[in-house]
Image: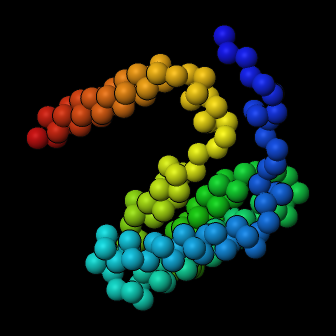
């Protein structure tokens, strides 16, 4: 059994309400700007269409962040942003056609590249300490997890291809 030096490493020190909105929106703007060339590569959209779609998504996220900060009951920002997105795309609203038309061509997988790249590079002191304590055993577990995920995904894909062919 591993003994950790401090229990505080596992206690959340803040929630989404304590995040400064301006700094979060600035970070979101940087990710959006990085996403522009990725969208141009991944889709056949024009620069104007990409900028319009990303601006609409930026506005959606901004509204969700403001709701996270000021609504009297707590929901994480991802929940508020999802709820705003769902509300904007309900077919009975007058802006449904406009909003879905603006974001229709945006490749959401390409939007995931900047945050996933950052997450892969952002390693905390706690993670380094856990890796040091675990030693070579964590490498074996990681390889087995990666191989199992790959083989499982390939098996599911093969099954689905055989069913649909």
106 relative position to 159: left or right? right
Quarter the C terminus occupies:
top left
Going 67% across and 36% down the picture, which residue do you hit?
126
In the image, residue 131 above or below residue 62: above
The residue shown at (38%, 73%) is: 39
Viewer can see residue 96: no
Q: Quadrant of residue 111?
A: bottom left
Q: Is residue 43 left or right of residue 145?
A: left
- Residues 141 and 75: in front is 141
Q: Residue furthest top?
A: 1
Whole-percent x, y for residue 105 in the image: 37, 73
What residue appears at the point 58 percent right and 61 percent down from the top-left corner? 86
Q: Where's residue 9, x and y in %?
A: 76, 34
Check the picture and name the quadrant holding the N terminus.
top right
Numbered label tally: 0
Q: In which quarter of the view is residue 10 placed?
A: top right
Residue located at (60% from left, 75% from top): 29
Residue 159 placed where, x, y %? 20, 31
Q: Is residue 113 above or below residue 3?
A: below
Q: Where is residue 54 drawn, in percent x and y? A: 51, 76
- Choose between 130 and 41: the one closer to the eye: 130
Q: Is 53 displayed left or right of 66 in the figure?
A: left
Note whether residue 23 is visible. yes
Outermost residue, left side: 165
Q: Name the one closer to the observer, 65 or 103.
A: 65
- In the displayed structure image, the side of residue 164 where residue 135 appears, left or right: right
């Amino acid at each position: 059994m591993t003994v950790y030096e401090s229990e505080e490493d596992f206690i959340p020190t803040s929630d989404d309400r304590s995040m400064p909105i301006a700094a979060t929106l600035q970070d979101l703007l940087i990710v959006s700007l990085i996403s522009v060339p990725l969208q141009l590569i991944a889709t056949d959209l024009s620069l104007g269409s990409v900028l319009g779609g990303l601006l609409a998504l930026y506005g959606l996220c901004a509204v969700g962040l403001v709701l996270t900060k000021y609504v009297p009951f707590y929901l994480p920002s991802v929940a508020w942003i999802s709820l705003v997105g769902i509300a904007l795309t309900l077919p009975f609203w007058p802006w449904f056609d406009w909003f879905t038309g603006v974001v229709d061509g945006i490749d959401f997988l390409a939007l995931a590249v900047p945050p996933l790249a950052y997450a892969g590079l952002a390693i905390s002191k706690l993670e380094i300490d856990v890796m040091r304590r675990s030693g070579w055993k964590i490498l074996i577990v990681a390889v087995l997890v990666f191989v199992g995920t790959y083989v499982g995904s390939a098996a599911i894909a093969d099954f689905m291809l055989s069913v649909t062919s």
